[in-house]
Image (cartoon, rainbow, N blue to C red):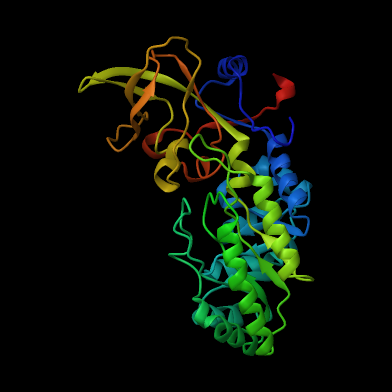
Amino acid sequence: MTKDKVFQLNQTAVEKLAEEYGTPLLVLSLDQVKANYDCLKKYIPRLRIFYAMKANPNPEILKAMAEIGSSFDVASAGEIRTLNEMGVSGERLIYANPVKLGAGFQACRDCGVTKMTFDSASEIEKMQKELPGATVLLRLRIDNSSALVDLNKKFGAGRERAVELMLKAKEAGLDMAGIAFHVGSQVINSDPYLNALDVAREVFEEAKEAGLDLRILDIGGGFPIPTPSMKFNLPEMLKQISARLDEDFPGIDIWAEPGRYICGTAVNLITSVIGVTERGGQPWYFLDDGLYGTFSGVIFDQWDFKLISFKEGDERVAATFAGPSCDSLDIMFRGRMTVPLEVGDLLLVPSCGAYTSASATTFNGFSKAQFVVWEEVNA
């Protein structure tokens, strides 16, 4: 697989895999995971990548990322301990949840995690008590209304309080090391990053005047993956960000916390039509995966999944697609154009590796979709 190619199964592979493993089936390409990692490192060479494992904590992905040298963004005791059990050193983790639990601090102490973020005075008091001397980054709030998911409504300190909070952290005996920000999800051009870097540069300068020697800048995540409705030039975008970092932050350690970008394009779902009916003059197709499973991203990630059928024919109908559970909420799409389908037909859902299986449940007794690793060389 070339580094600029997105993993997508062909009809032969879909049929072969469905016959061998059944459906619903999540098909993972570790080659794509590694290619995505390499792309970020190629265009922003100074970048230290902390994979945001909340996007997809599949053990195979975590293992692959650990082996290629990635660090990890963790948000809970469970994530910290999972990586520790895999042999990942705490030095490679940042506890990037700005509001931390006691169990999380305990996991940090047990597993050697000393890096974390904060955005409030109350968190400084907790860190001072639970992990004295921790290396901390202040998370700044960065407004970006164009993001698919706005990650600054819940987290981030206001620009006007930045130096005050950092001085307080230093006075508390913490290693006040730098600034973190996140411009939101699926950002398709460099402008939000460049605007955030302008703010960060001003804060760095004010911090220096106040006697703080910051050495780390964490630019978060938000790097986009392809969708039918979004067009962007990722290499150019990354090159512009890299150039600004070199210009304004020489000698500063540059970190990032990509999640979706690393795993989003690395997984395909194969799902089957298990029921067909008609309501209100429109066909309804019931699938063996739904909102409580892999399609949970429809609700929690505001994601519009692409459905691919390999059936031939020019006829297209507007249809409703629903999941297998006995819950009327379990409807993924209404009015989705498709060729007419029958029970047993297979559908391919590409680019569904992020915020899908990670937020899936076993509601109503339905199992989560099985994972299998598959590369193009197997096709």
Q: Is residue 268 above or below residue 236?
A: above
User: Is residue 167 rendered to the left or right of residue 36?
Assistant: left
Seen in the picture, residue 171 relative to 297 is either above or below; the reply is below
Q: Position of residue 234 (x, y in %)?
A: 64, 46
* Rendering quarter of residue 280: top left
- Asked if one can make out residue 109 in the rendered structure from this viewpoint, the answer is no
Instruction: Give me the residue at 61% from left, 27% from top.
Output: 8
Quadrant location of the N terminus in the rendered image: top right
Residue pictured at 59% horizontal, 34% vertical: 267
In the displayed structure image, the side of residue 226 where residue 297 appears, left or right: left
| Residue closest to the eye, 92 or 309 | 309
Q: How many marks?
A: 0
Q: In the drawing, does residue 220 fall left or right of residue 284?
A: right
**Place of residue 91 in the rendered image (x, y in percent of width and height, measured from the top left):** 74, 64
* Residue in the foreground of this view, choosing between 10 and 16: 10
Is residue 323 at all visible to an observer of this figure?
yes
Which residue: 40% across, 39% down? 292
Vertically, is 15 above or below 32? Answer: above
Left or right of residue 94: residue 339: left
Residue at horizontal 50 percent and vertical 34 percent from the top? 228
Query: Where does residue 352 sit, x and y in percent of width and height?
Result: 53, 36
Front one among 188 and 96? 188
Rendering coords of residue 38 (x, y %) = 75, 45
The vertical placement of 192 against 322, above or below, is: below
In the rendered image, the quadrant that contains the C terminus is: top right
Residue lying furthest left in this view? 280
